[in-house]
Image: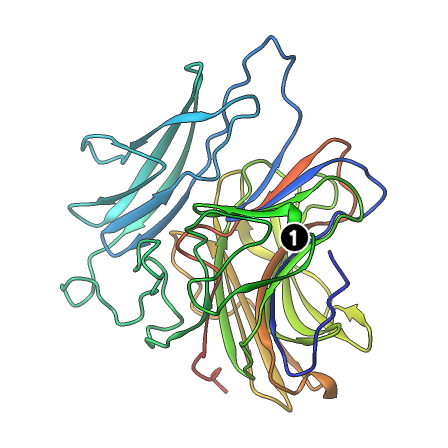
């Protein structure tokens, strides 16, 4: 995790930091759209099969899928086939949507094919239901994704219809930086401009070795209350200490922030901790907790919702669950804090990093799913 978070007081959205810790000299790619780690492929004269991975987000009777996290270690994925699990004709394309005739649980299967014809498949179950009012499913709280995503797959925090403070679906092509976000203004490169780029749906941070940080942030976002929702996945399982995904609701300046650290462990468990930056260092009040009943596999997207509200005290709440499944009725973890230097407005941020030194020659990537993150809104107050 990058600890060189220099910034002016008053808050700004530092956004995304990529840092290769430890003494390894391996090259790593960090891509904002999901979390990916791949190992070296077979010998050059053998064709390595592709890796199939996708995110699925449900809205009433519809499901939106995105297979941009799929990849091929020695070539290109050229075909994407979707079986919806309801007997209807298959779909195709890196992204697709499907409307089910009735509510229920269905198995969605992706088949990714490389240029040599080698296939790979992966499946997820999705549960869909008709809107409670029998209407069109417009709940007044859908994401405005700037016209680049599906526009309605992610709730903004209780259906309040709050406008986005910051949001980016990375639906563009940019080199030497990340360009301009859908909402929130231009990304400012702090470190590693030449190692940052965007292709439609994915922002990539290239880390050729230890100490090659890549940092960008969004300025102009400063609130004492914010809710951040983002969806992410890993296309292969983490190694070593796992992979960190940080979601921050208040970033103030030089090592001053409230963030929730989600750690994806190599055995498929998920842990969360409050990361508090103050006094020039990071601490974890209350320690790290494994979330009961929350697990992941390669290609399984998770959604994180983080609320940071009020001052003196500040209340922080975190919820992490499998995308496409019902969100828990209440936050899984809550904290209250009164650290004086953090009781001021700040920005919001998502970022990701390997947790400690990874296995030699590992390559890693952090993705936030296209069309669904990062997004930040002004939330309703937490219940007392």
The residue that appears at 67% across and 36% down in the rendered structure is 363
Q: Does the rendering let one see residue 267?
A: no
The residue that appears at 26% across and 72% down in the rendered structure is 140
Q: Secondary structure at mark 1?
A: helix
Residue 253 in the image: above or below residue 132: below
Question: In which quarter of the view is residue 349 placed?
Answer: bottom right
Q: Nearer the viewer, residue 285 or 45?
A: 45
Question: In which quarter of the view is residue 288 placed?
Answer: bottom right
Q: Is residue 213 left or right of residue 151?
A: right
Q: Position of residue 294 (x, y in %)?
A: 53, 52
Q: Nearer the viewer, residue 78 or 198?
A: 198
Q: Position of residue 267 (x, y in %)?
A: 64, 41
The N terminus lies in which quarter of the figure? bottom right
Residue assigned mark 1: 193
Q: Is residue 282 left or right of residue 319?
A: right
Residue lying furthest top:
45
Residue 136 in the image: above or below residue 338: above
């Amino acid at each position: 995790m990058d600890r060189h978070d220099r910034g002016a007081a008053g808050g700004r959205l530092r956004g995304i930091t990529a840092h290769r810790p430890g003494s390894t000299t391996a090259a790593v790619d960090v891509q904002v759209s999901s979390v990916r780690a791949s190992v070296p492929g077979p010998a050059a004269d053998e064709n390595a099969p592709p890796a199939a991975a996708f995110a699925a987000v449900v809205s009433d009777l519809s499901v939106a899928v995105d297979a941009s996290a799929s990849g091929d270690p020695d070539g290109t994925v050229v075909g994407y086939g979707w079986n919806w699990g309801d007997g209807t004709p298959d779909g195709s394309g890196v992204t697709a949507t499907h409307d089910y005739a009735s509510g229920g649980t269905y198995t969605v299967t992706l088949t990714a094919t490389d240029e040599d014809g080698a296939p790979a498949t992966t499946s997820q179950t999705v549960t869909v239901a008709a809107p409670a009012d029998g209407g069109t499913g417009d709940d007044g709280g859908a994401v405005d994704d700037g016209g680049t995503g599906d526009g309605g797959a992610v709730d903004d925090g209780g259906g309040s219809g709050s406008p986005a403070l910051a949001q980016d679906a990375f639906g563009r092509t940019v080199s030497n930086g990340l360009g301009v976000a859908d909402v929130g203004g231009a990304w400012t490169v702090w470190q590693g401009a030449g190692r940052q780029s965007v292709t439609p749906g994915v922002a990539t941070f290239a880390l050729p070795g230890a100490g090659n940080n890549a940092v960008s942030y969004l300025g102009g976002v400063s609130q004492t209350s914010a809710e951040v929702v983002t969806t992410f996945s890993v296309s292969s399982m983490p190694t070593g200490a796992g992979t960190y995904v940080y979601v921050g609701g208040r970033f103030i300046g030089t090592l001053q922030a409230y963030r929730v650290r989600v750690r994806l462990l190599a055995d498929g468990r998920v842990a969360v901790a409050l990361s508090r930056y103050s006094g020039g260092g990071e601490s974890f009040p209350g320690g790290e907790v494994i979330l009961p009943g929350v697990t992941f596999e390669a290609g399984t997207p998770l959604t994180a919702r983080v609320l940071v509200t009020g001052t003196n005290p500040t209340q922080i709440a975190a919820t992490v669950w499998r995308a496409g499944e019902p969100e828990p009725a209440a936050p899984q973890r809550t904290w209250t804090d009164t650290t004086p230097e953090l009781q001021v407005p700040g920005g919001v941020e998502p970022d990701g990093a390997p947790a400690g030194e990874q296995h030699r020659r590992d390559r890693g990537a952090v993705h936030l799913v296209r069309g669904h993150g990062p997004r930040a809104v002004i939330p309703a107050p937490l219940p007392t």
